[in-house]
Every structure is written in C-alpha cells, then in structure tokens.
Image (tube, rainbow, N blue to C red):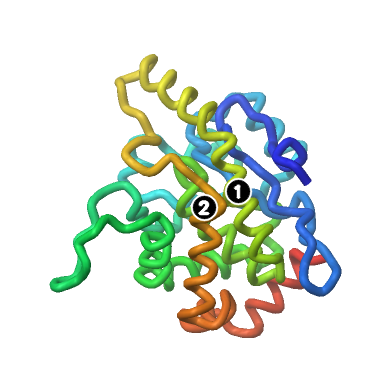
Amino acid sequence: MTLEDRLIRLDGPANFRDLGGYPTSDGRSVRAKRIFRSDSLSFMTDQDVGRVMNTLGIQTVVDLRAGHEVDRFSHGPLEEHGVNFRHMPIVDETRGPIEPPKGADTRPLALDEIYLMMLERFGDRFAGVLRVIADPSNHPMVFHCAAGKDRTGLVAALVLGLLGVDDDLIAADYALTEERMPVLLLRHRNRAALQDGAIEVEGQSFTAGVESMSSLLVAIAERFGNIEGYVRQFGIDGDVLSSLRDALIE
C-alpha cells in the first residue's frame, strides 16, 4: 500500500493515516480501518468531523501531546461529539535541549538515539497507550501528537512490531510522514498567521527518514531482544499481547 492508499484526506490534519494492511510474519495482515495514526486534531473542519465519525467510525482518540499543548490548541472538535478522549502524554524530547548525564558524551544526539531515550525514560507511558490500543472496545481509534511523527511514530512502531510486521515495513511507515511534512508545515504556518501567531509544530526535527527508525529498531533488538522484550519490561503481559493481536490481525 502506498501513502495515497493509507492517507485519509482531511482539511485540518495533514498526516491522518491507516495503520492497517501491512503483512505480518505469520502470513496474515493488520486489519484495515481499525487503528489510525495522525498529527494534531485541533483544527478539524465540520467536514473532517463528519468523515472521521460517520465514515471511519472513530470511537476513541488517544492524545499523546503534553498538557500545555492541549491547553493552547485544545483536543479539537471531536471532543464535543461524544468521542472517547484519552489524554496520555508522552514527553517529546526532540523539541528542546536534552541534559546529558554527568560525564556523558556531549555530542548532539541523533534522532534514533533520542527516540531510544524516550522509550527508556517513558516506558510506563508507552505501555499505558498500548493497553488502550489492545482493547477492542476502543476501536476504531486514532492516536496522535502534534506532527504525527515522533511520539506517534514510536507508538506506531511498537504496535506494528508487536503485530509481527517486518522492520523494513515499520521504518517505511514511519518515513511516510516525511512526504506529508511540507503540507503539514504550510497548514500550521497559515493558521498561525491568521490567529495569534502561535504555531503548534515547530522547534523539532522535521525529518522522518527510514534510517532513523531502522537504527532505532536495531538498538531495541540489541538492548531488549525485540519489541516484545521491551514492552514486557514495562508490564505488558501475554494477555495484553493476545488481545492486541486478536483485535488487529486478520
């Protein structure tokens, strides 16, 4: 499936995509139209709301943004239409300077290294999001952050890895965001010009290359054995994994 096959074209969000359709290691595939990833839902139009609710049937939104982001830009109009909102913030360490431990190498961290640090520091938060995703009563659902790249990209990688999707496909899915960044940034800059000058997506790396996710997956394998080994360290047990796979593999 190409980006065009996955992309849900909306006027507000620019990076709203279906995670379904990827082949799994046991010869099956990830269910389509059950779980979606996106950038911010704060600026959805009425037409966007109608499509997301009536065509996609979204039941649950997991907002990965920090509290100050939600305070400034809101959850968006879906909250007013009875959709189940779960605010489950994951700190985005791509947005500012990271204080290295004393005596550590002070060189700038590569994006994959920042991602690994986020996974290690906030494993409990990632595990909490996975539990929500694993519950079929929450489906269809969408999880998102601001650009739908870093926090969202990590959650998507964990989900696809636990479902048995090949690492190359996980990295390719992550990299699809790079194709959407120009229109995403344009939309955010245009909104800022029309409002109070506040822009939601800024101050972070705008790249989403295959190599960043590929390197991260190698690091996860080296440190934890695989993605399942990582999530089990943070309390994701066999019941949650079975529920996730039963709900999202066909």
Residue at the image point whose x is 59% and y is 38% from the top: 15
Coordinates of residue 46 in the picture (x, y in percent): 62, 24
State the residue in front, 228 or 239: 228
Q: What SS does tag 1 mark?
A: strand
User: Could you tell whether 212 is left or right of 245 in the image?
Assistant: left
**Dots 2, 1 in contact, CB < 8 A:** yes
Is 160 drawn above or below residue 56 in the view shown?
below
For marks 2 and 1 on the same chain, the one whose residue lies earlier in the sequence:
1
Measuring from the top left, give residue 217's x and y in whole percent. 54, 67
Q: Which residue corresponds to the image point at 55% horizontal and 83% vertical from the top-left?
A: 225
* Residue type, mark 1 in image: Arg
User: In the picture provided, is 61 more to the left or to the right than 88?
Assistant: right
Determine which quarter of the picture holds residue 131: bottom right
**Is 231 or 181 nearer to us in this picture?**
181
Residue at 62% in and 63% down = 133
Q: In the image, which disc is placed on residue 216?
A: none
Residue 151 pos. (x, y %): 46, 54
- Which mark, by number, is residue 37? 1
Within-10-Å neighbours for mark 1: few <14, some 14–19, many 20+: many
The quadrant holding residue 146 is: top left
- Give the Cα distance between marks 2 and 1: 7 Å
The residue to which callout 2 is attached is: 152
Viewer-proximal residue among 137 and 33: 33
Residue 40, percent from left and from top: 49, 39
